[in-house]
Amino acid sequence: MSEARSRLLSTATGLFYVEGIRAVGVDRVIAEAQVTRATLYRHFSSKDDLIVAYLTQADEAIRAQVNAARAQDASPADIIRAVSRSIADDIQSAGFRGCAFLNAAAEYPDPAFAVHQAVLKHRQWFLWTMAELFTGLGKIDPEPAARHFVMLRDGAMAAGCLTDPKPVCETFLRGVEGLLTYRSREEHG
């Protein structure tokens, strides 16, 4: 990645995440990245293209966190715990402003937009990945468990930027533990 593209993406990432995507115009990104308009459009064909690159970068970071958890020599339950702790750490980090994907979906609700499609692609991957991890437990119906996990995560990310994140994360992690101990109805008879 060229230095100019990297600077543009880094600048846009900071501005979009902190201030909102629609609140930040390309002129602001250009000024803060200290590049010309021609440079911006040489690297990104439109603001939407820049936004999709921002979301792609966020997606890659989350995939790396999940892959790091999966690389541990651990049980599926411990991998799920590691993913959960990583999410909780993000929520408690300085400057946390919620989930970049949920924020983008709120600003771009039309499923036909490339931005919304990038959000859906990430969320489908995350849901599928969590279902795969829950499958490894062997005692839980993985798809409902994964949906439950994602809903817990979404709620924690929304609440974590509105109030003290510590109790939010404690509640999130307890909810995940509840999922890990849940047994399907078939097992209970």
Image (tube, rainbow, N blue to C red):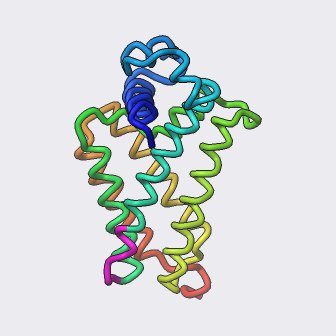
Q: Residue at x 41, y 21 (%)?
A: 19
Vertical side of 175 occupied by 96: above or below:
above
Residue 43 drawn at (x, y percent): 55, 31
Quadrant in the rendering for residue 109: top right
Q: Is residue 111 left or right of residue 69?
A: right
Q: Residue at x 36, y 33 (%)?
A: 97
Closest to the observer, 53 or 43: 43
Vertical side of 129 occupied by 154: above or below:
above
Vertical side of 38 occupied by 2: above or below:
below
User: Which quadrant is the N terminus positioned in?
Assistant: top left
Residue 84 drawn at (x, y percent): 36, 61
User: Which quadrant is the C terminus positioned in?
Assistant: bottom right
Residue span colored magenta:
68-74
Q: Residue at x 42, y 19 (%)?
A: 35
Quadrant in the rendering for residue 45: top right
Residue 166 drawn at (x, y percent): 23, 45
Quadrant in the rendering for residue 81: bottom left
Residue 55 drawn at (x, y percent): 52, 41
